[in-house]
Amino acid sequence: MVATEDLDSLLQLIIDRGMELLQAERATLFLYEAEANELVSRIAAGEDEIRFPADRGIAGATIQTSRTINVPDAYADDRFNPEVDQKTGFRTRNILSVPLHDYEGGLVGVLQVLNKRAGKFTDYDISLAEALGAQAGVALQRARLIQHYLLKQEMERAMKIARDIQQGLLPDAAPSISGFDVAGFSAPADETGGDTYDFLALPDQRWLMMVADASGHGIGPALVIAETRAMLRAISIGGCELATVLHTVNDLLTGDLEDGRFVTCFTGILDPDRALMTYAAAGHGPMLFYDRRQDHFTQVPATALPLGIMAEADYSNVATHQFQQGDFAAITTDGFFEAANPAGELFGIERIIEILRRDRDLPAAEMIHSLHKSVTAFTAGQPQADDLTVIIVRKE
């Protein structure tokens, strides 16, 4: 039995062995979920899954006392819960209920055998059941550990795929745009989310710039952000106005995304000849625009709802920003200002402004490097909870 690694197969093996050894009509194995304080039958011979509080019924009493309970007449015992009989049409006469312990003595479940085929359960039956239970408890713990290990491996593989998708979307290098210094950066979190940024040359010599963040972590958000990026690129190249681009992408995503999923997205179109950026922010913000002459930062909030929340949402609120020499725009995802130190304090938007002001005369790539370095120092070794993504567009 200890060699059996598949949990479902092991549960069925324990049930079959219990019915065979104890000459019983039926057996049920309940796994004990300590955090929820519930008992769950993953497999029951002839029954569907059962879930109930771990202080209920004969099985619950077995957990509470951590002792074998022999019930010669089920319906004469106040602890007996007849609901299962009522649901299944089965008639329980007698019960032998055995606690299952791991090798450290912790409770992992309960094995119940029902209706001795001839008479009632004896002391010898109890010794057989407890011997089986001793083996079963250790085997269950081992199978659960193996299952947990395999699940962890699968999650790690999924996260690697998500990271590969995410990193594959990023530009190979910052674009060379006349009169502007542009840079971008994205560092995935330990649990990969759905951040990305993008630069795309449009046919009319303008540039599409995007910073987006899909809610959630793992492969799902990575695929959503890949879909969003592809749609933004395809529709923008067609020459549509920015409001139309976002409206179209939103309606497409609304039909695709599960409830509660969405994408925040800054989308800007830079006209280098006019030093003018037309932009909209679907649930994304604040955006920072720095005026070099006034040494002043303007925080601009989102201009519309995130993408994918509601069909036919309004994305007509499109703004413009005129760049002068030394001005820059800094667009980050919330991973930067929500980064926390060990005390739980957030990095915050004011620290970002302070660092960008200090580094305002550095090249865009060096400004980003300095910002990332400052956030890393602030978190002091805390796991990175969210992706860190930023672009800086600076007028030379």
Image (cartoon, rainbow, N blue to C red):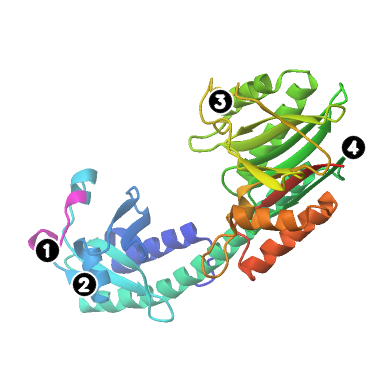
Which callout, 3 or 2, points to the residue nearer the camera?
A: 3
Q: Earlier in the sequence, mark 3 or mark 1?
A: 1
Q: Amino acid at mark 1?
A: Asp
Q: Amino acid at mark 4?
A: Gly
- Judged from the image, the secondary structure of the residue bearing numbered disc 4 is loop
Q: Main secondary structure of the magenta part?
A: loop
In this rendering, would 60 be left or right of 215?
A: left
In the rendered image, residue 115, in percent from the top left (x then y), is placed at 21, 60
Region of the chain picked out in magenta, as a range: 74-83
Which callout, 1 or 2, points to the residue nearer the camera?
A: 2
Residue at the image position 37 percent from the left and 61 percent from the top: 15
Residue at the image position 51 percent from the left and 65 percent from the top: 344
Q: Earlier in the sequence, mark 3 or mark 4?
A: 4
Between the residue at mark 2 and the residue at mark 4, the CA separation in whole angstroms equals: 83 Å
Tag 1 near tag 4, CB within 8 Å? no
Q: Which residue is at the front of the view, 36 or 337?
A: 337
Q: Which residue is mark 1?
A: 73
Which callout, 2 or 4, points to the residue nearer the camera?
A: 4
Between the residue at mark 3 and the residue at mark 4, the CA separation in whole angstroms equals: 40 Å
Tag 3 near tag 2, CB within 8 Å? no
Q: Which residue is at the front of the view, 150 or 10?
A: 150
Q: Which residue is mark 3?
A: 255
Q: Earlier in the sequence, mark 3 or mark 2?
A: 2
- Judged from the image, the secondary structure of the residue bearing numbered disc 2 is strand
Q: Which residue is at the front of the view, 314 or 385?
A: 314
Q: Which residue is mark 4?
A: 179
Between the residue at mark 3 and the residue at mark 2, the CA separation in whole angstroms equals: 55 Å
Q: Which residue is mark 2?
A: 69
